Image (spheres, grey):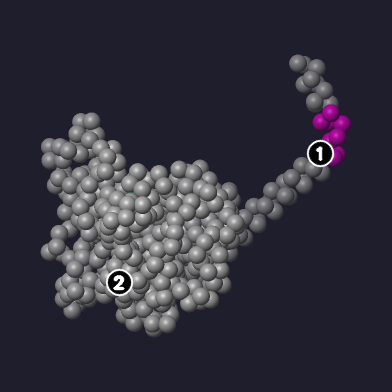
Amino acid sequence: MRMRHKHRKSSALCCSAGSRWSLSAVVWSLVGCILIIHFYSLVHHQEEGEAQVRLSHFPLTKELEEIEEENFQIQPRGKRSPRAAKRRGGKRPSLIDEFLDDSSQIRLLFFPDHKTAIGPTKAAANESGYFYPGRLWLDTEGNPIQAHGGGIMYDQRTETYYWYGENKEGLTYQAHKKGAARVDIIGVNCYSSKDLWSWYNEGIVLLGEESNVTHDLHKSNVLERPKVIYNDQTDKYVMWMHIDDENYTKASVGVAISDSATGPFEYLYSKRPHGFDSRDMSIFKDDDGKAYLIYSSEDNSELHISLLTNDYLDVTRMMRRILVGQHREAPAIFKHQGTYYMITSGCTGWAPNEALAHAAESIMGPWETMGNPCIGGNKIFRATTFFSQSTFVVPLRGMPDSFIFMADRWNPAELRDSRYVWLPLTVGGAADEPLEYNFGFPLWSRVSIYWHKRWKLPDGWQRA
Ligand code: DGJ
């Protein structure tokens, strides 16, 4: 032991000139590194400052600056829902348990009744255009909008937005004692709008099947998360959707096609893409006309992303596994200044959970996970994506830094009464949480989804 110590000492001494050199080299390298880091953070802060300055000229930010703090008053213990407590084995139910329980006394906070409904037939002139996330939303005829798990396509030819989503206007029941709450397939609804607030019901554009039990769209099956894109080469509108059986074991995607945005869509087929199980999914059309399918696979443990064929009717062999082992679903992709972003949820059935934002330079990955994009509300709001689940992110024409985050506030006790949570989403400024692979240096701009009880797009935003 002593010998070894001695030896180390002497060897250190015998290279003393060299070690002084290497010591000063180390010190200077450290100083260099510190200077580079300092310079980097200065530039970064400057950029951030610029982004804020730029953003403050931006009409939407006027609204965003008023980030709301929402505090739900939790009922005293005695008033807690007995059913929610029972479900928790007598333990104190959480706010999420209360949220899921239709007999809970605080349910109206999450699912306000018809009296507070919004929409063109209901709103006073000074309320027109205001989004109230979670309230009943009525179409131009005064009926609640039925377009769950939906997505929006902007049609350049008609300069119109089309909202496609699940029509869940049926009875909620459980096919099996332990099965998920469900509604029979009715079809895919389509609504049209020029301003994203006032929606005209275009009807059911893909109809469920009543009698043929072998048909994918037979009412006893599952049709979720329909999304539509337009193919410039074939001049067709193509719809992709999640197709399943009542036990979610078929785990496939379905494809339908139409000559018109408002249908009718002809159902073509379903498949397991690349032979893999596929549940929550979405499609994304890039600026270069290429389109992609993204789906949760391997029992929701990872996502797969695949290039579609030129006609958008099938997947190509080009597929990448992303976010492996992260157990994410409900993907919503968008692009900002050449970078791809995605919001996903965790996998907790109809119950809400925390959203995550992800970013990538190439849509095929690698994708990096950033933090929770939700801002405002209170802690439980942010931890539950404002009691909702992502479905789509809508780019706003004329407002390149702003998007609308579309989410579903599922009501598993009465799925037809699930609500829409639409909130402003911006990209910009510094990421505020350390990222996964870059030692805390933010490579991507922060994605922020702001809670607002009430908000509106700036007047004339379409012309901005
Ligand atoms: C979560 C998914 O995101 C929904 O689309 C739906 O499939 C539910 N699970 C069913 O429990």
Name the residue type under label 1.
Ser
Name which of mark 1 and mark 2 comes first in the sequence. 1
Q: Which quarter of the figure is the N terminus placed in?
A: top right
Identify the secondary structure beneath mark 2.
Answer: strand
Identified at 36% across, 78% down, the residue is 160
Q: Is mark 2 within 8 Å of ligand 1?
A: no
Q: In the rendered structure, which segment of residues is drawn in magenta?
A: 11-18
Q: Name the one closer to the observer, 305 or 100.
A: 305
What residue is shown with label 1?
19
Question: Can you give x and y, in whole percent of width and height, for residue 297 in the image?
Answer: 48, 47
Residue 16 belongs to magenta span:
yes
The prevailing secondary structure element of the residues shown in magenta is helix
Q: Which quarter of the figure is the C terminus placed in?
A: bottom left
Residue 191 numbered mark, or none: 2
Left or right of residue 5: residue 304: left
Residue 293 numbered mark, or none: none
Question: Can you give x and y, in whole percent of width and height, for residue 321 in the image?
Answer: 55, 50
Name the residue type under label 2.
Tyr
Give the spatial CA distance, label 1 vs label 2.
Answer: 75 Å
